[in-house]
Structures are given as C-alpha cells and as structure tokens.
Image: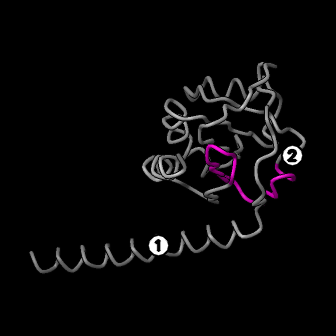
Amino acid sequence: MNQKLKKYLISFIKYAIFFIVVINLVSYYKSLDLNKNRLEIRSFELLDGTNYEIEKDKPLLIHFWATWCPICALEEQNIETISKDYQVITIATQSGSSEEIKEYLEKNNLSFKVVNDDFATLSREFNIKAFPTTFIYDKNQNLKFSEVGYSSTFGLKLRLWWSN
C-alpha cells in the first residue's frame, strides 16, 4: 500500500510541475503582444464617478478582468487581498453597466477600485486579448511585469515588492 501511495504522489507531482510549466509558457506567449510602453495615464474614472489619481513613487498593479470570466472569478480574492496593501486599479471590460458591476462586487464582497471599460477602449489601448491580464508598474510607471491568466496572491505580492 505504501509503494502505491508513493507512486501516485510522484505521478501527481510530475503532472503538477508539467501543468505549471505549460501555464507559464502560455502566459508568456500571450503577454508578448501586450503594450510594453511606460504608463502615460495619470488618472482613472472609477465606477462611482470619482477620479482616481495614480500615486507617484509607489508601484501600481493594473488588472483587466470581466464579470463573465471564470478564471477572473478564481483570481478575484487574490486581487482583493493585494488591494489592501498596494495601489491597485482593476478594469472591468465589457461587463455591463456600472450598476451591474457594483452589484457583482457587492455580491462577491469585493472592494477594490474598478473602472468600467464597457466599450473595451482601455483594453484596446493596452492590447488585451485574454482575461485576466495584469500589469505591474514600478514607482516611475515603467512596466516591470505582465501576466495573462491566473496569478497567486504570493506571486503578485512578490512582483509588487520587487517593483518597489
């Protein structure tokens, strides 16, 4: 019985490593076409109509997501956790009206800052082709990391710390 358990555990570890490598390769491939320019945007209009000014001398995470995206739903608590300690702007793309997005946020206990990109204007500007997509800028608004697909809380925190 012990040998059988070892065999299953080794197989599981092999498949997990393979899965992680494949996901990272796909993420890298999808991120090749993203906008790599320095961030020129200085403020965003949030769902509630207020204008959010980007704080200088702090790293910034910009996260593109959609209410209809299942991977985004898996990742939303990671973004929520990160938003408590770091400067985070999320951009809900083609996810309905501002009221519908507010209802989604309330239903899922999310409080991060959201921009409604209902016509995908920002998504086109950043050349977003898949969701979720995350950009991390350093304190000088230079792009340091971009990721397409799921990101863990630890991975995001590590990248933000590195960008500081």
Disc 2: CA contacts within 10 A as few (<14), some (14-19) or many (>=20) = some
In the rendered view, tell whether residue 59 sits above or below residue 8. above
- What is the magenta segment's predominant secondary structure? loop
* Mark 1 touches mark 2? (CB < 8 Å): no
Residue 122 figure quarter: top right
The span picked out in magenta is 123-142
The picture places residue 72, in percent across and down from the top left corner, at: 62, 47
Q: Nearer the viewer, mark 1 or mark 2?
A: 2
Choose between 66 and 112: the one closer to the eye: 112
The picture places residue 113, in percent across and down from the top left corner, at: 66, 29
* Number of the label disc, if any, that sits on residue 89: none
Choose between 80 and 103: the one closer to the eye: 80
> Seen in the image, is 41 located left or right of residue 89?
right
The kind of residue on which mark 1 rests is Phe
Q: Residue at x 62, y 50 (%)?
A: 136
Q: Earlier in the sequence, mark 1 or mark 2?
A: 1
Choose between 101 and 115: the one closer to the eye: 115
Q: Residue at x 69, y 46 (%)?
A: 141
* Number of the label disc, if any, that sits on residue 19: 1
Q: Residue at x 55, y 26 (%)?
A: 109
Task: Please name the residue that numbered disc 2 is placed on.
Answer: 120
